Image (cartoon, rainbow, N blue to C red):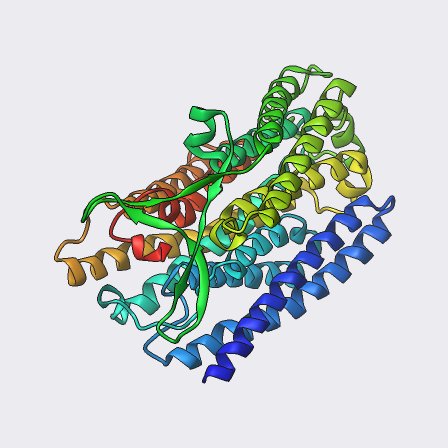
Amino acid sequence: MDNLLEWTIKALNTSAFLYLGACFAYIISMSRSNEGRIRQWASRAAWLVYVAFALHTFGLFGRWVVGGLDRPPWTNLYESLIFFAWGVSLVQVYVSRKWKLPLIGVIASPLVFILMGMSVMTPNKSVEPLIPALQSYWLKIHVIFGMLSYAGFTIAGCLAFFYLMRRGTSLSKIGSGICLVMLVNLSIAGGKEAFSTGKFFMASTATRTLPNGEVIQTKDTYREFEGGPVITRLEEVPHAWIGFWASWVLFLAGSVVFWRVRRKENDSFEDPGEELTPEQAVKKGGDLLPLSVWTFRAALVAFVAFGANVMWAKNLSPTLSMASNPYLVMLLLMSFFLAIVYLVAQLRYLPFLKSLPSAGRLDELGYKNILFAFPFQALLLVTGAVWAYSAWGRSWGWDPKETWALITWFSYLIYLHGRLLLRWKGSTLAVISIISFVLLIFAFLGVNLVLSGLHSYGAA
């Protein structure tokens, strides 16, 4: 079984790098100057995803064989990341094959890679016994419902982003939104220490010996008093604060500049009422002022310099390691991919839009994904309540994970009511879908990393 576990880890690590290769192949496809070349590179990227998905599947279910039938491979944060990424990749493969939309991977593949990258850098990959709270058949049912709902909602968010572009929503507004997302990522990466001290810190590293004798690197933590909170020792990264604050200020300026600059009177989220051709969509929303473009580029240069500084300092320090800061790296990579996709789309906007389906088709596909995922989100809440009653003697206790799962469900409920009863237009619904997806990510990952509660075992 030890050999099989080693092979599953190798397969999962390889699949992560193949997903990364697919990300770059999709970016190359966007940079092509004609529709045929775009589709050709998108097809190559899709095949990389298929191979990665096959290895991903072997690694995931191989861990199930190692752990036994009663221990499914989604019982800690490492395995939850793998399982969520597998679900998103599964739906991505289905959408690209069934609906002939390989370009869905432009956004979906970076998301899958980020999840897999987090798992690759998680130090403890051993198959450990279940804690008492997880020793229930509800574990299999509850988490599968969650994976299906989260995967469907993720693809719906990708389609909503494409819809806004295909509908002629201003690139200025999209650029402003990306700047704000990168601001949030930078703020999370720096934490309260950056804003209180003006410096940039990373978690210090300590060694830990697992029960099987394996030595791993992990966060250096301590307790000030018995029963007190776990505190992570931090270490200042030399000179990183310069790039951090330069990026933060420039992205803040970029969000303001992008939002305030309007080249056209019809620049809004409202639909004009008729289907636009790609040429009309470009004319409506594809024009940017040089001030916007160069502010964004300057912010990206500062951001890349900041990331390089972090990597350089990590290699010079014996107590800094990415093994204890995996989520920092993934936040930086997420921001980098967002910025690159946006810059390439802006440079090749017309051929990229021509390679997408019509706005009406994108709206329909996004709606289908939400219709598919919404019942599973409801079942996630119901089965979670039943499981909580059997495990803790109560169905609902306003635990952070429960609360944010409910908030996510309500956000998609607003989407469905707005579409079916209030007749809201497509662009408004697309914005709600994207906001709901952000809430979903926090409900799945942010709660485990930022908040504490009865679901904190997921952060182990």
Q: Quadrant of residue 174?
A: top right
Does residue 230 show up? yes
For the point 36% across and 65% down, which residue is it? 75
Q: Quadrant of residue 72?
A: bottom left
Does residue 101 show up? no
> Whole-percent x and y of residue 372?
46, 55
For the point 60% across and 43% down, which residue is it? 313
Nearer to the camera, 445 or 347 = 445
Outermost residue, left direction? 393
Quadrant of image for the N terminus: bottom left
For this view, does 129 lie left or right of residue 238? left
For the point 37% across and 54% down, which residue is it? 459
> Whole-percent x and y of residue 341?
70, 41
Nearer to the camera, 209 or 383 = 209
> Whole-percent x and y of residue 433?
50, 40
> Whole-percent x and y of residue 251?
61, 26
For this view, does 231 lie left or right of residue 80? left
Quadrant of image for the C terminus: bottom left
